[in-house]
Amino acid sequence: MTAGNALTALVRVADLGIDARRPLGAKKIGEIARGRPREEDCGDRPD
């Protein structure tokens, strides 16, 4: 499995709000790589 196929498979099962019915192009891959802010507590820092 190539990295592009693996990323497409991951996007299909994770709710990222990205349409992955077709192979991902450079624009969509860049969108995923940039990430997005999270509103929930990630639990990465103890208070």
Image (cartoon, rainbow, N blue to C red):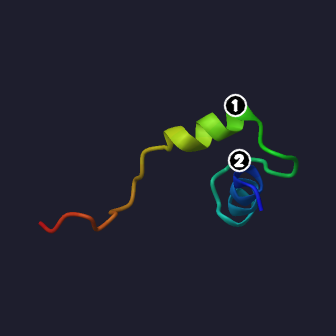
In percent of width and height, residue 4 lies at 74, 50
- 21 left or right, relative to 35: right
44 shown above or below 25: below
- Residue type at numbered disc 1: Lys
35 or 37, nearer to the observer:
35
Asked which secondary structure carries label 2, the reply is loop
Q: Residues within 10 Å of mark 2 (few under 14, many from 20)?
A: some
33 shown above or below 41: above
Quadrant including the C terminus? bottom left
- Residue type at numbered disc 2: Ile
Q: Which mark is residue 4?
A: none
Q: Are dots 2 and 1 in contact, CB under 8 Å? A: no
Give the total of numbered labels.
2
Quadrant including the N terminus? bottom right
Q: CA distance from mark 2 to mark 1?
A: 11 Å
In percent of width and height, residue 32 lies at 59, 44
What residue sits right under mark 1 in the picture?
A: 27
Q: Residue at x 42, y 52 (%)?
A: 38
Q: Residues within 10 Å of mark 1 (few under 14, many from 20)?
A: few
Q: Residue at x 77, y 43 (%)?
A: 24
Q: Earlier in the sequence, mark 2 or mark 1?
A: 2
Dividing the picture into quarters, in which one does residue 43 lie? Answer: bottom left
What residue sits right under mark 2 in the picture?
A: 18
